[in-house]
Structure formats: C-alpha cells, structure tokens
Image (tube, grey):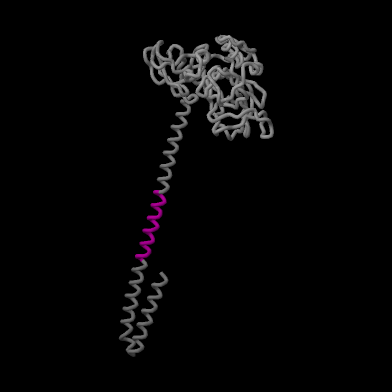
Amino acid sequence: MKFRFIKLGAIFMTAMTAVMGAGTVKAQAASIRAGVSVALAECLHENVKVAATQKDGAKAQEQAVQQEAAAAQKAANKAKKRSKKSVNAQENTICGYTNLGIANVSNYLNVRAEAGEDAKIVGKLPADAGCEILDTKDGWYYIRSGKVSGYVRADYIITGDEAKQLAEKLKKTMATVNTLTVYIREKPNTDCTILTIVTTDEELEVVEEGEEWIEIKLDDENGFVSAQYVDLSEELKKAMPYTETERSAEVSDSKYSLAQTALSYVGGRYVWGGTSLTNGVDCSGFTMQIMAKYGVYLPHSSRGQAGYGRSVSTSELQPGDLIFYGSGSTISHVAIYIGGGQIVHASNSRDGIKVSNAFYRTPICCRRML
C-alpha cells in the first residue's frame, strides 16, 4: 500500500504548485482540498479492494489446505480399511489356504483328472499334505495343491476347524531359494566348505533361523544358506505331479520299467535306515529295493552303491541310472534318474519319496547299473 501514499503526495504537491503559480490561494484551496479528497478516496478504495483480495486469497488458501487435509484423511481411511481387510484375510488363511483340506492317509492319496477311481492319476497328495478345496462332486473334492489340480476322495480329507488345528501342528518354516543358484555351506560363514549348489525355487526345510544365516535340511543332512538368498514362509506339504518316463529308442524296456516302478512309490514315507517300500525307506534303501526288483543287488549305503555299475556323464544319463550327491567328493545321497532331467528319490522325513530336478543340487557322479 506504500505506493498509494506516494501517489497521494504527488497529487498534493501538484495541487500546491498550481495554487502558488496562480496566486489565488483561497480560490485554489478548495480545489486542493477536493483533489486531495478524491485522491484519498481512490487510495482508500484501492486499499479496500486489495484487502478484500488478500482476504479472499487467504480464505481460498485455507480452504485448499482444508481440502488437502480432508483428501489425505480420506486416503488414510481407505488405506486403513484395505489394511484391515488384508489382515482379516491373512487371519482367515492357513499357510495360504482359505478352504483348507489335509490328507488323512498313512502313505499318499491319488489325485485324479476326474471324479472316479478309474480316472487318470495326475498327482499324489502325501499324508498330512495341505490342499485348497475348490469344489465338491459326488463324494469327491476338486483340490489344488502345489502345481497339482484334480479330484481326491472326500472321505480321506480333513476339513474345517479340525484341519486348521492340525495345520498349526504340521506346518514347517521353509526357505525358498530366490536366486539362480546358491551355495549350501557346512558352517554359517563364507570361509567354510561348500556342501553343494542348489538351484532357484528349491524349498529347504528350516532347522534354525538367524539374521545372516539360515540352517536348513537338504535331503537327510544339514547345512547353511545366506539369509539374503532365500524367502521364508510357513508351509504344509504339497501334492506332487504324477510323472511318466519318456519312451525312446535308446531306452530299453527294462530301464523304462525300472523308472516306472520307482515312480509308482512317489508319495511314500521316508524313514532313516528304512528298507521297506511300503512302510518307509531312506535314499539308499529306496534305490537298493528298486534295483533288486531288476536283479541288481546293492548295499544299503549311498557311498557303497557308487562303487557298482559303470560311470556315465550327466550328458549320457538314461532312465534307471543312479545319480549320487554329497559335499566335495563325499557321497551322502542317491537318486534314480527317470529321464527328462528329473529324478525320483527318498528325500527326507518331510517330503518322503518325490520327484525333483536332477540338478536341484550338484551331482558328484552317475552310475549305470543295467
């Protein structure tokens, strides 16, 4: 507003100069007073306009702040509502299942393509494994578990509150590899022996959690993996896809038959020192019993079995060959190759007999027995 008073002063001086020049003080005095009054009135009018504008601006700014605050509160309320829904959804979920079912069998339950005993088998649901119940049809449940979807007999599935309570006892913390490959080490440091290399998406049972290192179980031995290369979650056992050996001119009928026989036991129990294909086996007990059905008699030791047959490279593998794993040059695990880059083996007490990628860990050697 300072410039308006300067304007008023200039008008006043102009008026005085005009009066002095004319010499008629009295006549001009009224004119001066009138001019000053007009100028003052203009100035006051403009000041009122500016004040009104400033008031309107302040009011508009205040309204904008209030609107912004209201919008922020609204967004916060929505986020809080979404968060609450998410929490409620998690509270109603057990290990990722919203309509949980648990296999109530001693060994495994066949998962079929259709609701019927004669329908094609597409997977096997091990004892105590979890599944999502999607539909019901004539005494059968249509379920999804892991990568398997299909029908199972409803009378072999525990549901409802009983399933939820059972899941709390059965669930295990699992470490899923989140990188292409990761070292499994003998101790929780980078200076110790590397037991093996494990590939992406492999699930490892957690023995003990640490901030930097996770102790895990790999098949029937323990090791350590860097915490940054795995994701932890609580899981139930999952169904395993039913696999058939690929036929080719290079594979003899006996090798094909051996691989198919081994696959028929997928879902079976793992028992340390066990040699029963129906009641439980360990890794070498499994290969020993399968090979015996085809006239090859092996000792009950993975290290001892590696001394039989003849050596083959990984590029030469055929169904029925044995693959040996361990740390360094020390063998501690054995599996049967079934073709297509896959093996069947008695893995551990959690997974039992299952199908895995043949290179889920680093092979030490391969032997052909037939």
Instruction: From the top left corner, tell me how far across and down residue 339 is, in percent.
Output: 51, 21
Tell me, yes or no, if residue 160 can be seen here.
Answer: no
Residue at position x 35%, y 68% from top? 46
Q: Main secondary structure of the magenta part?
A: helix
- Residue ranking furthest to the front: 249
Which quadrant would the N terminus be assigned to in this image?
A: bottom left
104 magenta-colored: no
- Quarter of the figure with residue 61: bottom left
- Nearest the eye: 269 or 227: 269
Tell me, yes or no, if residue 182 can be seen here.
Answer: yes
Which stretch appears magenta?
48-67
Horizontal arrangement in the rendering, residue 33 relative to residue 301 (left or right): left
Instruction: From the top left corner, tell me how far across and down residue 365 is, in percent.
Output: 62, 23
Number of numbered discs present? 0
66 magenta-colored: yes
Determine whether 225 is above or below 106 in the image: below
Instruction: From the top left corner, tell me how far across and down residue 131 is, in percent.
Output: 46, 20
- Nearest the eye: 299 or 200: 299
